[in-house]
Amino acid sequence: MEKMIHEIIVEIEINRSQDVVWEAMLNEVSAWWPKDFLCLPDGPEIKFEPWAGGRLYEEKEDGSCLLWGTVLMITPGESIELTGCVSPSFGGPSMNFIKTSIQAGEDGKTLFRLANTVLGNFTAEGAGEVDAGWKYLYGALKAYCEAK
């Protein structure tokens, strides 16, 4: 594996207002997060604590848990910044810095943007998989918001 810094950018137009998208991103994560995008077996819910130091994580009743990331910053109505570690069992070791942001677009639409900077062990193949994964995940956010 090659040690490098890599940035992945995903942009999606969502046909809903910025307020609707923000509410879904902040308070409805388990409603739109696909079960097949969870890492722990037998599909626990994803949980999000929307404050600095809060966690994005999976947790099961048997005590199994997985930390996706820790909140660094929230700018209300605009962006969420997280950081997280990737262990060797998931392709690391690496550190991820993730910023999801939204802004009002034309005709009541919202422009969603994710910037994921990865520091550490990462391959070109891994970058393609991560890019596809983010597009799948936030495509689910788009579908959820547009169905509301």
Image (spheres, rainbow, N blue to C red):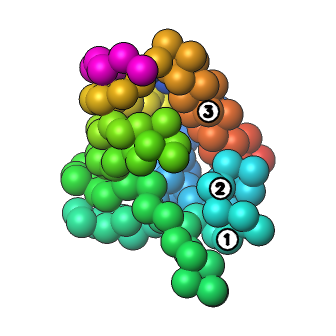
Q: Is residue 84 above or below residue 56?
A: above
Is 73 a magenta residue?
no
Question: Label 1 crowding class (10 Å Cα cut-off): few <14, some 14-19, many 20+?
Answer: some
Q: Secondary structure at mark 2?
A: loop
Residue 59 in which image quadrant: bottom right
In the displayed structure, does residue 124 sit left or right of residue 52?
Answer: right
In the displayed structure, does residue 137 sit left or right of residue 104?
Answer: right
Disc 3 vs disc 1: Cβ atoms closer than 8 Å?
Answer: no
- Three-letter code, disc 2: Leu
The residue identified by callout 2 is 38
Residue at 50% across, 53% down = 25
Disc 2 vs disc 3: Cβ atoms closer than 8 Å?
Answer: no
Q: Secondary structure at mark 3?
A: helix
Q: Nearer the viewer, residue 25 or 19?
A: 25
Q: What percent of the width, then of the height, locates residue 119?
A: 28, 29
Residue at 72% across, 64% down = 41
| Any part of residue 65 in sight | yes
Q: What percent of the width, then of the height, locates residue 100?
A: 39, 38
- Three-letter code, disc 1: Pro
Magenta region, residue range:
1-6
The Cα–Cα distance between marks 2 and 3, rounded to whole angstroms, is 11 Å
